[in-house]
Amino acid sequence: MDLYPYQEEGASFLASKPHALLADEMGLGKTAQSISACDQVNAKRILVLCPAVARLNWEREFTLFSQINREATVVMTTRENITGSLIICSYDLASRKPILNQITREEIDVLILDESHFLKNRQAQRTKIVYSKIVPLSKRVFCLSGTPAPNDPSELWTMLNAFGVYRKRYWDFVREYCTGFQDNFGFKITGGKNIPHLRQTIQPIMLRRKKEEVLKDLPPIRYSEIVVEKSEVDEEIYFPETLVPNHVLDFEPMLTAVKLILDETQSEQTLQALHAIGGNKYNSGGVAKLRRYLGVSKAPGIAELVANDLQNGMRKIVVFAVHRDVISILAGALRKKFGRFGVVTLFGGTPPRRRQENIDRFQTDPKCRVFIGQVVAAGTAITLTAAHDVLFAEASWNPADNAQAAMRCHRIGQDEPVFVRFVSAAGTIDERIQRVLRRKTETITQLFG
């Protein structure tokens, strides 16, 4: 895939440095730029360290953006036998001895530290291991983060010290660049100082662009795909009437369904045929039941993905789904497990007054950061321009429904490009389905958007 001009500039910047921080705002494609930079330096051995939720997507992005065919190992457990020239691993697994011993057994041409602010805590075990054991073995290190210091300037010290940009001790850095006060538990950092001098210190290794700086390069609405790992489904809760074993995710009816949705005409006859497929001892509800199973299986991974985005600088996001179960899992996880993000929902049974209250709250309240709606119920006649990030946890079989839903954000009142992602369950037929639906939705948007 081709890069935008600003992305080509970013890739060249990374390729020209032994150590670099690409701090572009979220949504500007730091992954693609770092992959292109790997190609530019003809990297033979690449190690990508990233949050666990991003592992499979990094593998997919390399197939899309790299011009070099590399054998990849995605490290999923401590028992992994690591081979190949591209290693993709979570920060936590890289800190485990069985994996660390394998990834450090030879020199690394390029080390990519995705969401590098995960290494901001100088006392954390993973920070010590990465900067003391892995970075010294790496010819080049690319740090990627839209929020390199989420809380205060002191969080830059681990990276700057490891790169030799600032060689003094941590507390020297704090005295130079941080404000705070002393209490019974030590010095509490409250903010920053001498920021112009700190910017000058970082400038040789950092490139940062904001969306408004590169708007001329970006289309008004952009579509892409992303994968998440599927989770185990509690069949007694979600499928009490008919248990659906995990292996049916690749059952023949789903393959037949994909062949049908590949039919470019997308006729009414085709849509009716999709609902008629099925009817065996595992699949009494046909494709509809399998699609619901897929939606439930990927919902926990999607919740983790959304939480990661929000924690890393995304202001607001609109999530669309098809099934009430999926909406419930997403809303529950984002309200509880991943921190209390302000979450509102909208589905077919939402009372009219509550419906408008939830829309207004999302549009006007900065603390309300997530809107989760059913594709059809929330896909027309409302405005959600407070967000410019859209994620389809599940997509409608009808691409026109998806296009209408995306237009809730891409309409009058929106002053930024809109980024739309279709999420699929890795390693299942869902990847092929979402790819087709994304492409058809994008085509409809180009024609009528």
Image (cartoon, rainbow, N blue to C red):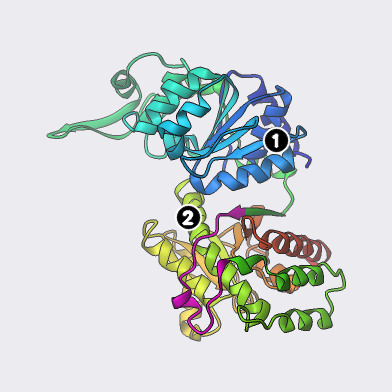
Q: Amino acid at mark 2?
A: Glu
Q: Which percent across, then down, holds residue 340?
A: 37, 60
Q: Which percent across, then down, holds residue 305?
A: 51, 53
Q: Residue furthest front?
A: 281
The answer to which image quadrant residue 172 occupies is top left
Q: Which residue is mark 1?
A: 7
Q: Is residue 235 magenta?
A: yes
Q: Secondary structure at mark 1?
A: helix
Boundaries of the magenta span: 227-246
Which of the pair 413/35 is nearer the observer?
A: 35
The answer to whether marks 1 and 2 mark residues whose Cβ atoms lie closer than 8 Å is no
The residue positioned 57% from the left and 19% from the top of the image is 107
| Residue 214 appears left or right of 96 | right
The answer to which image quadrant residue 58 occupies is top right
Q: Which residue is mark 2?
A: 304
Marks 1 and 2, how far apart in space?
A: 27 Å
Q: Is residue 14 magenta?
A: no
